[in-house]
Amino acid sequence: MNLVLLQILPFFALIGLGFYAGKIKFFSPDATAALSKFVFYFALSALLFRFAANLSLAEILDWSFVSAYICGTGTVYLLATAVALFRKAQIQEAAIEAQTAVVGNVGFLAVPMLITLMGTSAIGPLMLILTVDLILFGSLAVILITGSKKNYSTVGVLRNVGIGLLKNPMIVSITLGIIWSMLRIPISRPMNDFLEILGAAAIPGALFVIGASLATKSAENLQAAGWLSFCKLILHPIAVAVFALNVFTIDSFAAGVMITTAAMPVAGNVYMLAQHYGIAPQRVSAAILISTIFSIFTLTIILEYVLRLSR
């Protein structure tokens, strides 16, 4: 376990550096937002496109893998929703809590960490998880929130969801990369070098942004935030592990990527969604802060298990 902890410490050290820079105001919120845009729209997109363009659709698409992840994630999603409704929360609030419980920091943390620790073979499963999170669970939250408002039509809700997906650079870069691969278009040496150099900025940039953005988060409403962090760090990886290993019998390496990705802390885009609609942003903010801090310990344990599983 000590070896695994030493392997993940550099990632959290970069997060800590970003947090320190944000806390002492060396990196302002505007600077953090600008760096986040660079990573999200350019560096991470280049990284995902380059990997997708060098993989065939058959290497990426695995319906058993997708089914196991949907079932495991859906179980925790329904549990978090049920608990919120039991507390007499409105459907919009329950949707945000469920989103917080299952949507982890895949793009900015899982992708750089697992590619580094588990190799480029992890990129296929990671792309599938990213796609399911963005298309299915991300869209579901928007549909539940906007659909519960009387002044929104079904057509309007679906149009907003579709436009949001088309504007998401991670979905666009993965899709374009797969199309590029399917058309068998060769990637020239200068183009590959360009994508490699730009994509290399995604790992340190993404981790630094996580830390800098955490500097603006506050730990309020600790009871609810603690429950949602427990769902994300503990219940989510356990649920996907049960479905991946005992129901769908996924390949041990791919199952390991899925379990570790499910153990990632709450994603920052959940806070942006909550803030956009004005639904429990402080609760989500606290869950992001708490889950990120405790993920140092939970990820160490889960990665130790996963690395043994993959051998």
Image (spheres, rainbow, N blue to C red):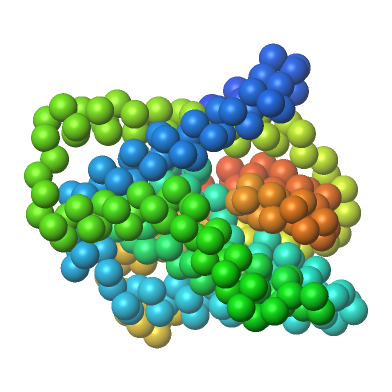
- Is 55 positioned to the left or the right of 168 in the image? left
Above/below status of 140 relative to 23: below
Above/below status of 65 relative to 130: below
Q: In the current view of this chain or complex, which residue is farthest to the bottom?
A: 247
Residue in the picture at 85% in, 75% down: 90
Q: In the current view of this chain or complex, which residue is farthest to the top?
A: 26
Residue in the picture at 48% in, 34% down: 39
Residue 113 in the image: state x and y as whole percent.
42, 42
Residue in the picture at 64% in, 73% down: 156
Residue 242 visible here: no
Q: Nearer the viewer, residue 289 or 274?
A: 274
Image quarter hosting the C terminus? bottom left
Residue 94 in the image: state x and y as whole percent.
77, 72
- Is 132 positioned to the left or the right of 35 in the image? left
Residue 288 in the image: state x and y as whole percent.
69, 48
Total count of labels: 0
Above/below status of 192 relative to 53: above
Residue 85 visible here: yes
- Is 43 positioned to the left or the right of 220 in the image? left
Residue 161 in the image: state x and y as whole percent.
57, 67
Which image quadrant for residue 102? Answer: bottom right
Q: Nearer the viewer, residue 226 or 220?
A: 220
Residue in the picture at 35% in, 82% down: 248
